[in-house]
Structure formats: structure tokens, C-alpha cells
Image: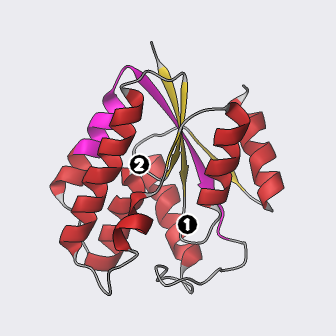
């Protein structure tokens, strides 16, 4: 059985979680939450090694849900986000993240579809967000990566309702 994996991606404070929750409820599909939020909530600071642990937990959570063979899975982020985050913050990324991401893309039992959230919505500050002033640059990095890996993607814009409608229309189910 093939699973459709819907990945919501994009810069910080671009509406990823809101959209993922909406889609999961609408399709009555499981949603894999962003691990970084829970992992970092009680940390004062973090190191690059923390990003590898976040990536491993994110991948484990996604794999666990996929092992149940859902017809559709919504992911509030995936390894692409952690890859870009590591490259931007530290100038490099752990090879495990690259390799595992590429392995996920190669799996024949899943079909991944990315929805890139445009950053042109108001910034919502919180203690875990770091990049209020370069979201447009980050958006361009996401776009470059999606193209580099030749991923199926759609850019979504507007308010939460408009973004939701764009995804539902683009997904065609």
C-alpha cells in the first residue's frame, strides 16, 4: 500500500503548524508534529548535535506512523527543515540528515508532496524562533532545495483559510 505524505515546509512563523493541523483534521489523517518545539522548549541554548537528535526523533515519529500504512500522512515539517536550519545556523549539516532525507525520497511505498508556506504573513515571536528579519531569504533557500531535489511542491500564500484551500485544491483529494 502506498502512503501519500503531505509535508508542510517553510521558514519560521510561516503558518506551517496551523496548516498541518487544519489538513489533518479535514482529511482525518494522522499528523506528525514538529519535534523541535517539544525538544527545545526547556533548553536555554542548543548545539548542532541537538539538531541531529531532533532529526532522528522527527524521522522516527514519521516512520512509526508510516509503518501503520495510512493512506495519507500530514507532516508539520520534515528533515528538509532541519537540513536548512543546520546549514543556515552552522554552515553545514550532519551527513545522517542528508542520507536519511534522500532515503525517504527514494522510498517506493510513499509519495511525498511538499507545500511551501510563503513568509509574507506577520511574524509571531516566541522563545524558539530566531529569524524574524530574513524569512524571505530562508524562503528562497527552501525553494532552491525543493528544486534541487526535484520535489513535487506548491507554494501557498495568503491567510490561513486561503492556504488551506490552496492545498486542498492542489492535492485534488
Vertical arrangement, residue 79 with respect to residue 91, above or below:
above
Q: Is residue 24 left or right of residue 108?
A: right
User: Which of pointers 1 and 2 indicates the residue nearer the eye?
Assistant: 1
Q: Where's residue 159, x and y in %?
A: 80, 62
- From the image, tell me which residue sits under label 2: 148
- From the image, tell me which residue sits under label 1: 139
Residue under the image location 26 percent in, 77 percent down? 90
For the N terminus, the image quarter is top left
Q: Is mark 1 on a helix, strand or loop?
A: helix
Q: Is residue 106 on the magenta stretch?
A: yes
Q: How many labels does the image show?
A: 2
Query: Gap in Å between the C-alphas at discs 1 and 2?
Result: 14 Å
Residue 99 got which mark?
none
Q: Where's residue 79, x and y in %?
A: 36, 52
Task: Give the colour scheme shown.
Answer: secondary structure
Vertical arrangement, residue 61 with respect to residue 43, above or below:
above
Instruction: Read off the magenta span.
Output: 100-119
Q: Is residue 110 on the magenta stretch?
A: yes
Q: What element carries label 2?
A: helix
136 and 129: which is toward the camera: 129
Residue under the image location 54 percent in, 21 percent down? 71
User: Which residue is the extreme one toward the top?
Assistant: 1
Vertical arrangement, residue 80 with respect to residue 130, above or below:
above
For the C terminus, the image quarter is top right
Amino acid at each position: 500500500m502506498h502512503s501519500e505524505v503531505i509535508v508542510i515546509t517553510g521558514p519560521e512563523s510561516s503558518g506551517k503548524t496551523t496548516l498541518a493541523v487544519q489538513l489533518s483534521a479535514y482529511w482525518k489523517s494522522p499528523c506528525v508534529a514538529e519535534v523541535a518545539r517539544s525538544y527545545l522548549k526547556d533548553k536555554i541554548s542548543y548545539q548542532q548535535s541537538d539538531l541531529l537528535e531532533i532529526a532522528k526523533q522527527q524521522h522516527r515519529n514519521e516512520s512509526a506512523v508510516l509503518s501503520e500504512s495510512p493512506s495519507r500522512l500530514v507532516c508539520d515539517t520534515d528533515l528538509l527543515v532541519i537540513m536548512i536550519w543546520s546549514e543556515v545556523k552552522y554552515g553545514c549539516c550532519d551527513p545522517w540528515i542528508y542520507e536519511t532525507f534522500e532515503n525517504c525520497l527514494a522510498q517506493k511505498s510513499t509519495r511525498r508532496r511538499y507545500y511551501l508556506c510563503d513568509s509574507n504573513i506577520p511574524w509571531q515571536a516566541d522563545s524558539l524562533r530566531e529569524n524574524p528579519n530574513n524569512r524571505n531569504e530562508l524562503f528562497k533557500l527552501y525553494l532552491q532545495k525543493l528544486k534541487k531535489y526535484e520535489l513535487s511542491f506548491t507554494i501557498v500564500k495568503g491567510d490561513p483559510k486561503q492556504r488551506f484551500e490552496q492545498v486542498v485544491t492542489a492535492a485534488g483529494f
